[in-house]
């Protein structure tokens, strides 16, 4: 056996930040307890570690949790409470659901059907691929799996069909456009559904710790208008700013027909997977009305897939992405909740709220959203960013007088759209940019413009829509 390679240099910044905060305790504000201050030091070090990643994020989180117990900041019983969080297990179950889409081939079949129906023009082809993302988003909290595992292989095959490859400098024929539009389609669908990406569920759990309860249907209703506007308009904007050289794609339908013919008739596992997905989607929509917890629905769906043989216990145990997420998600939720329980978040919210006395909550929320969005240039993980800032920003917004649910939703949506900043902003960005079809300069330039568009659509239009539906 050989030892795993660990980049110990990447521990320097987490340790430095954590130690500086820890030993600055003599200068802490009087309203913050020593335990709260020490938890802040460990939490900050853990978040920095999630960014530098000397170990995978689950390993960093595990070390942070262990230190919080060894240093007597919390007890081991308190430290493991996060593993009993329902939201944590909901995301795990949803990962297993998404595995069913991939294993049965249903995700690929849906993608090919969309291409066959809408792929006569390059722009229509882009919309068809985004449609696949939209259909699978409610049950696929890994937006990386959605964009990289389901849609990207289709894009790669299409690009190859039309002779578009970064290897020979022909990526702008069609590949670059399809990659970039799919990325932004994924951004929009991530914001529309509570279960559209992991950071949304982090936000839901953190909001709950502050007494704000967000439902699956409530999130969808609030996000559907800005989401649909984004899905309709952004491909058109990209088509004007970053046009493909090939405008017509008559061969796409022929290619999709050939691929579907090779797949054969829809199989029984695909039918079962589709049926379970529809059942889960309907129950999630009705969960807040019939008193059925969204996590229970996710467990029910996975149970049905196991009972019908679509998934095996081995599939569940081998879904490392789900178990990895359960570990780090549980620990980060525990730490963020402890900061609230130990009084640091309430103190910070109260202090900032007092300093903002007399300032309109609308102005405060605008400033918080802009800060939250543009600070993501410093983060390489949406989950790390949401875990680090969401609670504090929501607390400040509420203290300033903002309607709690509206503020929680607005900051939740920002956690999705700030993925449109850099090529390292989130998993889909890394996966799609890494394919080599889009230059870094183009990625930053186009995303800067589209970022402004998102802030207007999700912030202004989305805010007005939330007024219409009575959230403020």
Image (tube, rainbow, N blue to C red):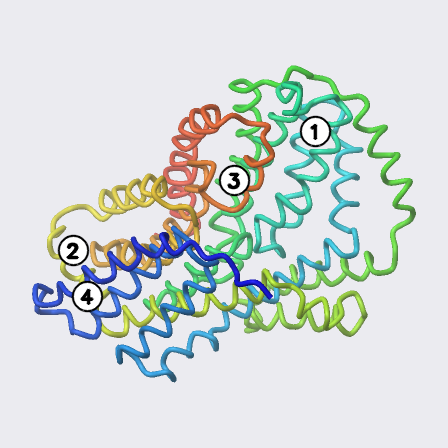
Instruction: Identify the residue under disc 4.
Output: 22
Sequence-earlier tag: 3 or 1: 1
The reply to whether discs 1 and 2 touch (Cβ–Cβ < 8 Å) is: no
Residue, x 21% and y 58% (percent of image)?
399
Name the residue beneath numbered marker 3: 429
**Do the numbered discs 3 and 1 sit on residues whose CB atoms are within 8 Å?**
no
Q: What residue sits right under mark 2 in the picture?
A: 352
Instruction: Tell me residue 117's x, y (percent).
Output: 78, 33
Q: Which residue occupies the foreground of this view, 27 or 181?
A: 27
Q: Position of residue 323 (x, y in %)?
A: 57, 67
> Label 3: few (<14), some or many (≥20) within 10 Å?
many
On the picture, is 393 further left or further right than 232?
left
Q: Tell us which disc is closer to us: 3 or 1.
A: 3
Looking at the rendered structure, the secondary structure element under dot 4 is helix
Q: Nearer the viewer, residue 465 or 267?
A: 267
Please state the horizontal and vertical placement of residue 222, each as a whole percent of the image: 47, 50
């Amino acid at each position: 056996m050989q030892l795993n390679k660990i980049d110990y240099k990447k521990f320097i910044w987490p340790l430095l930040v954590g130690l500086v905060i820890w030993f600055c305790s003599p200068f802490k504000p009087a309203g913050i307890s020593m335990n709260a201050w020490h938890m802040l030091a460990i939490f900050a070090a853990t978040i920095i570690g999630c960014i530098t990643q000397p170990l995978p994020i689950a390993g960093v989180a595990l070390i942070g949790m262990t230190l919080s117990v060894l240093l007597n900041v919390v007890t081991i019983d308190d430290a493991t409470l996060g593993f009993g969080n329902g939201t944590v297990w909901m995301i795990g179950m949803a990962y297993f659901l998404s595995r069913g889409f991939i294993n049965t081939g249903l995700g690929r079949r849906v993608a090919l059907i969309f291409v066959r129906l809408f792929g006569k023009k390059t722009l229509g082809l882009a919309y068809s691929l985004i449609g696949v993302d939209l259909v699978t988003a409610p049950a696929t909290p890994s937006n990386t799996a959605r964009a990289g595992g389901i849609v990207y292989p289709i894009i790669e095959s299409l690009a190859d069909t039309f002779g578009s490859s970064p290897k020979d400098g022909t990526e702008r024929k069609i590949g670059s456009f399809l990659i970039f539009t799919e990325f932004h389609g994924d951004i929009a669908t991530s914001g529309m559904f509570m279960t559209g990406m992991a950071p949304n569920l982090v936000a839901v759990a953190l909001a709950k710790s502050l007494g704000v309860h967000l439902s699956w249907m409530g999130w969808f209703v609030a996000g559907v208008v800005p989401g649909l506007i984004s899905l309709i308009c952004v491909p058109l904007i990209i088509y004007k700013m970053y046009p493909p050289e090939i405008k017509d794609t008559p061969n796409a339908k022929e290619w999709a027909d050939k691929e579907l013919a090779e797949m054969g008739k829809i199989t029984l596992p695909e039918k079962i997977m589709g049926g379970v997905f529809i059942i889960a989607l309907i129950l999630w929509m009705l969960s807040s009305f019939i008193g059925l917890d969204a996590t229970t629905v996710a467990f029910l769906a996975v149970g049905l897939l196991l009972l019908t043989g679509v998934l095996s216990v081995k599939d569940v145990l081998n879904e490392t992405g789900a178990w990895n997420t359960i570990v780090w998600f549980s620990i980060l939720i525990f730490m963020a909740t402890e900061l609230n329980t130990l009084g640091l978040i309430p103190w910070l919210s109260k202090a900032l709220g007092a300093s903002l006395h007399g300032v309109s909550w609308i102005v405060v929320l605008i400033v918080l959203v802009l800060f939250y969005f543009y600070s993501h240039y410093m983060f390489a993980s949406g989950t790390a960013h949401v875990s680090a800032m969401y609670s504090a920003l929501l607390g400040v917004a509420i203290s300033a007088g903002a309607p709690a649910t509206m503020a929680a939703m607005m900051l939740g949506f920002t956690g999705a759209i700030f993925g449109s900043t850099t090529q390292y902003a989130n998993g889909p960005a890394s996966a799609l940019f890494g394919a080599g079809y889009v230059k870094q300069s183009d990625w930053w330039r186009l995303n800067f413009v589209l970022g402004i568009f998102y802030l207007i659509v999700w912030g202004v239009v989305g805010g007005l829509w939330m007024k219409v539906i009575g959230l403020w």
